[in-house]
Amino acid sequence: MNSGNYDVIIIGGGIMGSSTAYHLMKADKRMKVIVIERDFSYEKASTALSMVNARIQFSLKENVEISQYAFKVLENFEEEMAVDGVKPAIFYRKEGNLFLYDEKSEASARKAFNMQKELGCAVEWWSPEKIKEKYPIYTNLEGIVAGTFGSEDGHFDAYSVLMGYKAKAKSLGAEFIQDEVVELITDKGAIQKNSAEDASSQSLNQTETNNIRKIIGTQSSIQGVKTASGQIFYSSSVVNCAGAWAAEVAATAGIKIPVAPVKRQVFAVEPEFKLTYPLPLTILPSGFYFRTETGGLLLLGKSLPEDPTGFDFSWEQERFELLWGELYEFAPVFESLKLVKGWAGLYAMSLLDANAIIGEWSELKGFYLANGFSGHGLQQGPAVGRYIAELITKVDHALDLSIFSPERVLLNKPIFEDGIV
């Protein structure tokens, strides 16, 4: 079934896909843009399952600048995304982020802090005494030598932000359909696949294999996509915003990107001790983190090396004991807790360096990646959606994000960020 031609096809209608659609339509309302989303319920989408956070505290300058833009967007989001007078309610709460450091991490934290201050960020360096003054229930600061507090960091309603972008993009003319992309159509798809197989079967060395791929890449360009329902959509510009499913989508054109779905879990507990003020998202040196949530709840989480890779959404209640132990040791006031609920979602992890992969894949002209956000996609959605739209429409970039180019994947040149949670 031939379903028509489009200026741009976006695969995935989560925060990244919807933001990209909005920015494309904002740039040119005459564009014909379609977003293909596998499930409009967003039941398994990382956007909807996130613990939600926006923070300025990164060690890579470009990540900080992305967050600075996100703060501006969130501040005015409800007005900007109004459709026919109806505004999304995103409940943006600037309750802060507090990173705690031990001696091992102090030097890198100080370096990142100085860079953030040079960029004009609202971030403060706190001594252990200042931390206890601000949050007296944090009684066990043994081994903690400092903390950094971002006063403009906070959280919001992720689903409302997603729906805000989606509704605004649709109002400007973008089309959204529920279907699953099962194949990328290229002009040299068969040659690409067969040549890759030949390279591996002939035991060529890495240089020879890379040269073959380079030659193949110069011959290939994207033509469109095929969906599970049998529809075919044609376009010379296709954007992979498939989140945790990004590698599966790319693989249909013989492209291997280092992005994998990694399970992360969140637990919501009700403490017997009732707080009279909100707690910031507090991140311990161990990687354990928690913050207050509406309704008198605490949200807890921790990324662990043994977190499984794959499309696993099971929630492991037994992990709660581990998290509760860390919380109690740090703040004994939370000795008595009631586990209320929990859930599991997926990080689209960049296995190269835990940083986003953004831009055109040089071996397939017209195929753009917005993948591998490693848990930071929500706050990076506004800036990345704008950047992808600028690449496609060939206008000057408001923010240079070329450091995240897919070329570093092909060259195996990772970039490093200390602020991964």
Image (cartoon, rainbow, N blue to C red):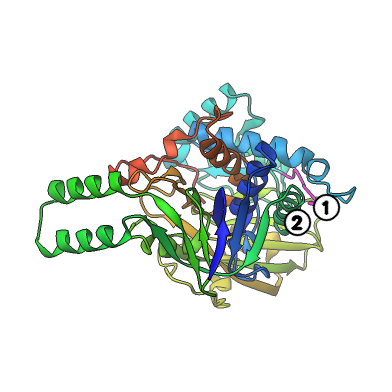
Q: What SS does tag 2 mark?
A: helix
Query: Could you say where residue 60 lies in the image, as x and y percent from the top left?
Result: 48, 35
Residue 314's tag is none
Query: Could you say where residue 323 lies in the image, as x and y percent from the top left?
Result: 57, 66
Residue 294 falls within the magenta-colored stretch: no
**Image quadrant where residue 37 sits:** bottom right
Q: Disc 1 marks which residue?
A: 89
Query: Could you say where residue 236 lies in the image, as x and y percent from the top left?
Result: 47, 48
**Image quadrant where residue 198 sits:** bottom left
340 sits to left or right of 210: right
Q: What SS does tag 1 mark?
A: loop
**Residue pushed farthest top?**
118
Q: Nearer the viewer, residue 158 or 202?
A: 202
Highlighted range, magenta: 88-95
Which secondary structure dominates the residues rendered in magenta?
Answer: loop
Query: Could you say where residue 91 lies in the image, as x and y percent from the top left?
Result: 80, 51
Q: Nearer the viewer, residue 347 or 251?
A: 251
Q: Nearer the viewer, residue 164 or 2?
A: 2
Instruction: Give the amino acid type for the residue marked by disc 2 in the picture.
Output: Ser
337 sits to left or right of 248: right
Residue 178 against residue 400 in the figure, above or below? below
Instruction: Give the amino acid type for the residue marked by disc 1 in the picture.
Output: Ala
Q: Nearer the viewer, residue 405 or 145?
A: 405
Residue 92 falls within the magenta-colored stretch: yes
Disc 1 packing (10 Å; few <14; some 14–19; many ≥20): some
Disc 2 packing (10 Å; few <14; some 14–19; many ≥20): some
